[in-house]
Amino acid sequence: MSHINVDHEKCISDSICAAECPARLIRMDRDERYPIPVKDFEDICFRCGHCVAVCPTGAISFEWLSPEDCTPIRQELAITPEQAEQFLCSRRSVRVSQDKPVPRDILEKLLEIACMAPSAKNEQPWHWIVVEDPAEVRRLAGMVVHWMRGIVQANPHDESLVGFVRAVSSWDEGYDRICRGAPHVVVAHADRNWGFGAEDCALALSNLDLYGTSRGLGACWAGYLYHAINACPPLFEALGLPEGHRAFGAMMVGYPGVRYERIPLRRKPRVTWK
Ligand SMILES: Cc1cc2nc3c(=O)[nH]c(=O)nc-3n(C[C@H](O)[C@H](O)[C@H](O)COP(=O)(O)O)c2cc1C
């Protein structure tokens, strides 16, 4: 049930909720006094919570969300454009980690913030596997290398496998290119049939990465691992993904073993103005 409750004592008839509803499911009543749901509201509402978030007087609530459930936005915590620019531009993919585990409560907080990412239709399709044990991260990296080695051996002349060849020979030399010696790995997975799984999970992982940076952590996409999970059934099983799901991203997480002093250049925007 998703019935909309409007507190008539608090409602100031500003109709902001109606204007804000992305699915246009809220209208003002005949007297333009109070918001009312359109027919089929309950079936169509995707619970983004915008009407509750935007109401200046906290007049709207649902069984599943009330203004009191929501964290107030503290304007004094807003960051400046200058801070945002440095923060976003100085985030790096961290591939050198300290030999120090990240406490469980911090990993939990990363996931909480990851789950605040936007998702198509507010589906929030992500599920998470956190590999907390560094020895297990290493074992999984070894499984990826084993899978890569088999592919390289079966296709010795395939030049597109150069990345695999390098990863295998690095492993044999004692360096892990798969998980880079990170203590933890976070895998995002979702129903394989959800059409926006890749976008939604990437955005959630990006939140995790950025928030982690603010907490003094370092993360890096584990592209080889992520790819291998979907292509190598033993790895899929070892991680315990449910049937019908697929991995949509994976990240290494740890405390950085290096500090960046400057921001590298990027290509200028390749843009067409119309
Ligand atoms: C989808 C994706 C997969 C990636 N896979 C890997 C990976 O397997 N190993 C790795 O070391 N870096 C990986 N990266 C990190 C990129 O190499 C990195 O983002 C890029 O070089 C830019 O560096 P920066 O993130 O520090 O700005 C991946 C990044 C993305 C977005």
Image: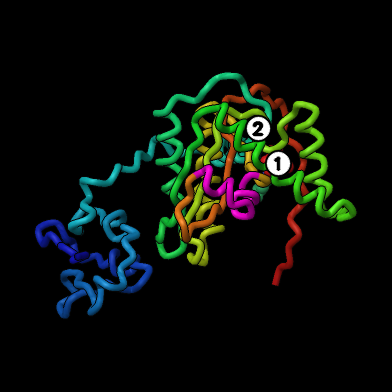
Q: Any magenta on residue 237?
A: yes
Mark 1 beta carbon near ligand 1 (under 8 Å): no
| Foreground pick, 28 / 266 | 266
Image coordinates for residue 11, horizontal then vertical, percent: 16, 60
Q: Residue at x 52, y 31 (%)?
A: 214
Q: Are marks 1 and 2 in contact (CB under 8 Å)?
A: no
Sequence-wise first label, 1 or 2: 2
Query: Extreme left residue here?
Result: 9
Please identify the dominant SS of the magenta region: helix
Span colored in magenta = 225-239
Residue 205 visible to an observer of this rendering: yes
Quarter containing the N terminus: bottom left
Q: CA distance from mark 1 to mark 2?
A: 24 Å
- Quadrant assignment for ligand 1: top right
Image coordinates for residue 167, horizontal then vertical, percent: 77, 39
Quarter containing the C terminus: bottom right
Residue named by callout 1: 146
- Secondary structure, mark 1, is helix
Q: Amino acid at mark 1?
A: His
| Foreground pick, 85 / 64 | 64
Q: Residue at x 59, y 52 (%)?
A: 233
Mark 2 beta carbon near ligand 1 (under 8 Å): yes
Q: Is residue 129 above or below residue 189?
A: above
Q: Tag on residue 94?
A: 2
| Foreground pick, 105 / 90 | 105
Image coordinates for residue 254, horizontal then vertical, percent: 57, 28
Residue 92 visible to an observer of this rendering: no
Q: Is residue 147 above or below residue 22?
A: above
Q: Amino acid at mark 2?
A: Val
